[in-house]
């Protein structure tokens, strides 16, 4: 059974896909970065390159859109007017990706115009993740009514003393999916580094036999690629094996990737012992959405916004479990400053103190 859980809040939206009782995907969206997924536009073709099989279209004030010719719904020429839908958000310096919409073409002299705005971010995310495959969709939070209106009465509203992720025992797995290291039995590990150009996954046997550790590692790596919403190019560096053993390992990875509905592509052969996976993008990775650049120096850390969202969830859960109880939160200084200005936390029964850890802790005082 496939279950989609969506837990929306004032700062971020968390989603999980569960298959056979196990979380296989996590997604995170910030509410201050609304998605353009689902926008419908009248536009005009700017350039059309049949050699690359792609075109760029003019979306007026929204910039340019990238259109694969196979998604256009018919032949294209430069200057042609057509109707498109945004199917992938702007990512970095990459234009939004669009696809042709069936129906009559707009007038030849029509200026680019938005015909339908994007739905609420939670609705757009739910449509992408369910895609007609989720047997249950369970939602909670301020977007619940919009989700039910958009997806139909089959959507279940979560009610209970605990939040949806807590009821489905997802919080620990969600936190683990933000960690850099994944431990393997008995002593191996994966180290996952998301770089600007690609994601590198290093396999360390930890002194164990390389063959069995590698096989376990590539199966786990395929699961982590999906669970963390990694996309673009992912480079795996296994412990070196003989040519025949590497070929078998390549097959193990291909079979593990086949369970991913986004159909990742595994490059043939190995690149000097490395294995290259390419996966279609669907929003930011979990780590990209939950972290921010370090104020000083290189690297990233859990963002103020993500930690503030954690604080709001913990306070809500505590108040459901023990209404009226005094609460004590320990948070980083930047989160404490944010909390002091957040209207929903101006409560004499909530005491907030600054801590040194980049985390949030809440106890009943």
Image (spheres, rainbow, N blue to C red):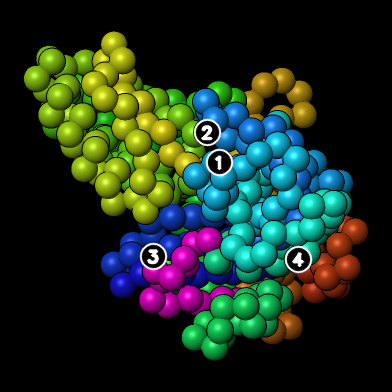
**Residue at mark 4:** 116
Q: Nearer the viewer, residue 242 or 153?
A: 153
**Residue at mark 1:** 68
Residues under numbered marks 2 and 1 in contact, where contact means CB atoms less than 8 Å apart: yes
Residue shown at 69% from the left, 59% from the top = 105
Instruction: Please tell me whether mark 1 or mark 3 is closer to you in this view.
Output: 1
Instruction: Answer whether residue 131 is magenta in the image.
Output: yes
Q: Earlier in the sequence, mark 2 or mark 1?
A: 2
Quarter of the figure that contains the N terminus: bottom left
Residue shown at 38% from the left, 76% from the top = 135
Q: Nearer the viewer, residue 218 or 109?
A: 109
Residue 213, given in percent of the width and then of the height, sits at 19, 31
Q: Earlier in the sequence, mark 2 or mark 3?
A: 3
Q: Nearer the viewer, residue 171 or 276?
A: 276
Indicate the secondary structure of the residue bearing disc 1: strand
Indicate the secondary structure of the residue bearing disc 4: strand
Indicate the secondary structure of the residue bearing disc 3: strand
Magenta span covers which residues? 128-140
**Residue at mark 2:** 53
Q: CA distance from mark 2 to mark 3?
A: 36 Å
**Residue at mark 3:** 18
Circle 1 packing at 10 Å, graded few (<14), some (14-19), many (20+), is many
Residue 13, given in percent of the width and then of the height, sits at 64, 62
Give the left or right position of residue 80, taking residue 276 as reference. Answer: right
Residues under numbered marks 1 and 3 in contact, where contact means CB atoms less than 8 Å apart: no
Residue shown at 29% from the left, 67% from the top = 20
Give the left or right position of residue 254, taking residue 34 as reference. Answer: left
User: Relative to 154, does residue 29 appear above or below in the rendering?
Assistant: above
């Amino acid at each position: 059974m496939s279950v989609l859980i969506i837990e929306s809040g004032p700062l971020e939206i968390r989603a999980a896909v569960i298959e056979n009782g196990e979380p296989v995907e996590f997604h995170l969206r910030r509410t201050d970065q609304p998605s353009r997924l689902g926008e419908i536009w009248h536009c005009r073709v700017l350039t059309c390159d049949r050699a690359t099989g792609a075109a760029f279209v003019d979306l007026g004030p929204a910039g340019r859109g990238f259109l694969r010719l196979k998604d256009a719904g018919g032949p294209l020429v430069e200057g042609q007017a057509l109707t498109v839908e945004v199917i992938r958000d702007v990512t970095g310096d990459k234009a939004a990706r669009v696809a042709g919409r069936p129906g009559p073409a707009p007038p030849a002299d029509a200026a680019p115009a938005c015909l339908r705005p994007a739905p609420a971010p939670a609705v757009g995310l739910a449509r992408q993740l369910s895609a007609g495959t989720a047997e249950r969709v369970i939602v909670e939070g301020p977007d619940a009514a919009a989700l039910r209106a958009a997806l139909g009465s089959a959507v279940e509203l979560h009610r209970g003393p605990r939040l949806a992720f807590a009821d489905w025992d997802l919080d620990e797995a969600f936190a683990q999916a933000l960690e850099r290291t994944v431990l393997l039995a008995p002593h191996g590990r994966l180290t996952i580094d998301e770089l600007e150009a690609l994601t590198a996954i290093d396999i360390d046997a930890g002194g164990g036999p390389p063959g069995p550790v590698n096989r376990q590692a590539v199966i786990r790596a395929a699961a982590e690629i999906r669970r963390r919403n990694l996309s673009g190019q992912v480079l795996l560096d296994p412990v070196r094996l003989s040519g025949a053993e590497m070929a078998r390992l390549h097959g193990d990875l291909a079979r593990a990737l086949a369970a991913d509905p986004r159909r990742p592509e595994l490059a043939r052969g190995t690149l000097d012992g490395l294995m290259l996976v390419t996966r279609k993008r669907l929003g930011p990775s979990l780590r990209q959405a939950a972290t921010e650049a370090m104020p000083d120096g290189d690297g990233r850390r859990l963002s103020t916004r993500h930690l503030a969202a954690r604080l709001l969830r913990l306070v809500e859960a505590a108040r459901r479990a023990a209404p009226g109880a005094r609460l004590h939160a320990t948070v980083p200084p930047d989160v404490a400053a944010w909390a002091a200005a957040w209207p929903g936390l101006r409560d004499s029964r909530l005491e907030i103190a600054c801590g040194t850890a980049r985390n949030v802790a809440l106890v009943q005082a």
